[in-house]
Amino acid sequence: MPSAGIRYAACDALLDALPSILWKSVDEGWVRFDPHAGETLLLAPVTRFILDQLSIPGCQRSEDALIQAVLQEEPDADPAECGTQVRTALEALLDARLIQATSH
């Protein structure tokens, strides 16, 4: 269940690294390499989509807005499954410290 007033935004470290990030599509999703941090991450396609949505400086979006963005991109997706995938992606991005949750 989404928390009222919670929005997600990119961390400053993510925004600072954007110009140098390298991406590669693989069968399992997307590989993201940050040469400055020396980190490599494997991201599911929906996780990459959400990261792209939040990688705009000053952009903050709620869980509901991110679910709607995914459903707009994939109109045949099941809304309940989409919500589950978005929540899983947000947790993964928070754990990786690429995004942060903010109170609105």
Image: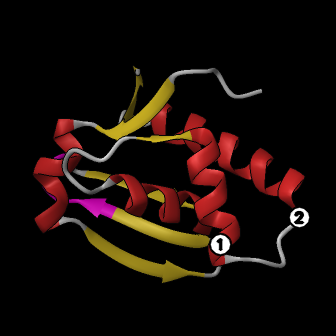
Of the image marks 2 and 1, the number of the one nearer the N terminus? 1
Residue ID at (18%, 60%): 18
Residue ID at (83%, 71%): 77
Asked whether residue 98 is in view, the answer is: no
Dot 2: within a 10 Å radius of its alpha carbon, few (fewer than 14), some, or many (20 or more) residues?
few
Q: What mark, if any, has residue 72 been given in the picture?
A: 1
Residue 56 is left or right of residue 3, and the answer is left
Of the residues shown, which amino acid type is indicated by label 1?
Answer: Gln
| Nearer-the-camera pick, 31 or 18 | 18
Point out the stretch of residues depicted in magenta.
Answer: 33-37
Of the residues shown, which amino acid type is indicated by label 2?
Answer: Asp
Q: Position of residue 45 (x, y in %)?
A: 59, 69
Dot 1: within a 10 Å radius of its alpha carbon, few (fewer than 14), some, or many (20 or more) residues?
few
Q: Position of residue 81 (x, y in %)?
A: 86, 55
- Secondary element at image label 1: helix
Q: Nearer the viewer, mark 2 or mark 1?
A: 1
Q: Quadrant of residue 47?
A: bottom right
Residue ID at (64%, 65%): 70
Q: Position of residue 35 (x, y in %)?
A: 17, 59
Residue ID at (73%, 51%): 85
Mark 2 to mark 1 CA distance (whole Å): 12 Å
Q: Position of residue 86 (x, y in %)?
A: 66, 49
Residue 1 is left or right of residue 19, and the answer is right
Residue 48 is left or right of residue 99, and the answer is right
Q: Main secondary structure of the magenta part?
A: loop
- Secondary element at image label 2: loop
- The residue singled out by tag 2 in the image is 78
